[in-house]
Image: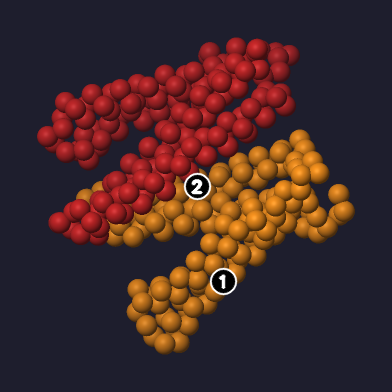
Amino acid sequence: MNRQQKIAWFTLVVVTLALGLSLIAFSIGYFIFGAPARQAAAGFGFIGIMGLLGFTPILFNKNKDKVQADERDLAILRKATVIAYSIFWVLFVAAAMVPWFIIGPQGTITVNYLPWMVFGGMTVVMLVQSIVTLSEYGWRDKND
Amino acid sequence: MTKMQRKAYIRLIVIGVIIVVSAVLLVAFREKGILNVLGGLGFLWIFAIPGLMGPPPFVPFRKKKDQIVFDERDARILQRATADAFGAFWYVFPILCLWLYLFVNVYRTEGLGQISSAYITIMAGGGGILVALVQSVSIIIQYREGQR
């Protein structure tokens, strides 16, 4: 398994774990304890687990004696990036237009919506990029 | 000049027109408020549709018979330009969002914690223009580098 595959797996696991735990915590707070949605949203604090992705360069450091990336690796990386951003773009435009359509141009929304757009966008990009990378290389170790 | 280069130049011209007209109108009608002035800019999307999405499939980009208009090199250039464009977008987008978040929560005294839904729509439009602008510039630069 090469470095890009390992990074993609690590990203996928961390993002899925952060999202999964957040949704579970939110559901427990909202459905089991009957907390208001605003309070139950504190469960999304588990998103902080995604901070582990900052350790990627340390965990998967570059081996100086090996070729880091050839043309095929770069092509895969570019393809994964373009697909991730294409999906992000559709969601971003939808997220920007939906409040306008629902509450109208004179309406106002909470400013908390903006950081949610940033973190949601980042999550989508990382998730899609790792899925595409793994599907291009293969999900398992092929010893290449 | 390839088809993609011509498209990139046309986009740059269209974006230039949008930015200049917007700036002139914003300055001329500043007392009416940003949102009202930008609302009047709706007609600019007439330029933006062919400019950003690509021109309609007739003159001046009609494909000649037996002519290859898009090869592997073009695909690579387009992919890299798209990655550059979204890279630039991701520098601006989080900074803008977090700045607006702080600005609205800290400095505004009326309607604390609320922003007009129109600002988010404008943000999407601005994001689209930024992506198209960086993509076009990147395409032009890559072809120029290739010619050397």
Question: Would residue B9 appear left or right of A80 to someone viewing this image?
Answer: left
Q: Which mark is residue A20?
A: 1
Displayed quadrant of residue B5: top right
Which shade is chain A? orange
Residue indicated by mark 2: A90
Depth check, front residue: B61 or A7: A7
Instruction: Name the element at disc 2.
Output: helix
The chain coloured red is B
N-terminal of the pair, mark 2 or mark 1, is: 1
Where A55 sits versus A89, above or below? Answer: below
Q: Position of residue B122 (x, y in %)?
A: 33, 41
Name the amino acid type tagged 1: Gly
Instruction: Name the element at disc 1.
Output: helix
The chain containing the residue under callout 2 comes to A
Residue at 47% in and 35% down? B131
Does residue A131 show up? no
Question: Would residue A89 appear left or right of B14 to someone viewing this image?
Answer: right
